[in-house]
Image (cartoon, grey):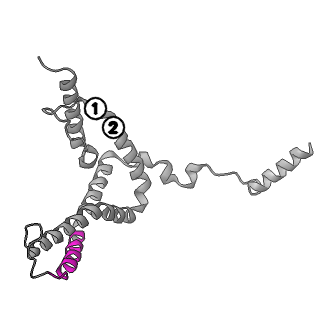
Amino acid sequence: MLQRAQWVSTRAKSTAAGAKPKPAASINPSVATSAETLSWPKYLEIKRSKRTWQTVVTIPCALLGLAGGAMYFGNLDTDPLNLSWFGVDPFFFYGFCTLGCVGTCRCSHWPTIGGSIWRFTHRRVLPQIDAKDREFFRRIAKNRVDASLQNPTQPVPDYYAGEKVGSLHQYRQWLRDQSKYRRKAVLPEE
């Protein structure tokens, strides 16, 4: 009996003297109702906005790659006696390397930087977006045609639909294309 009394007294102290603990939904209602508050058209509009941010960031990344490549390759010394590298004039070779820096910087950094900036500016809807992303990609994975059904004359249609779908119309068209391909691959015409 003494142990039970001690447990009750410590339990009472741990709940702040009779204060009832709040359920998880009342602590942060936006997280609890995240899936219900964001409609599919709104989600796809936000997804398009994110893609736009990622694309816009390509311009400064490409310019940064151009400036870095030009500064590095523009300051390299050229040997006047050996004016041919790999069968190409060194100035052309340095120019190609500079363009390579532009492409590398643009392609490798723009999705990361643009996505990070977008996530930072849209912090208040991130739980909703993440919940819809999980649901969206679950639907994509469920409805995607099995890649083992493709052959060289009939490739699988638009395998990366998760990145390219921007509206309900496009999603429904993707579903129709997947269904049509599945019927054609499983039940070939004679």
Residue at 15% x, 32% y is: 154
Between 21 and 101, which is closer to the camera in this rendering?
101
Q: Is residue 145 visible?
A: no
The residue that label 2 is drawn on is 141
- Residue 100 to residue 18: above or below: below
Q: Which residues are magenta?
A: 60-78
**Quadrant location, the N terminus:** top right
The image shows residue 117 at horizontal and vertical percentages of 35, 66
Cα separation between marks 2 and 1: 10 Å
The image shows residue 15 at horizontal and vertical percentages of 74, 54
The image shows residue 141 at horizontal and vertical percentages of 33, 37
Between 125 and 157, which is closer to the camera in this rendering?
157
Residue at 92% x, 46% y is: 2
Q: Amino acid at mark 2?
A: Ala
7 horizontally vs 137: left or right: right
Q: Amino acid at mark 1?
A: Asp
The residue that label 1 is drawn on is 146
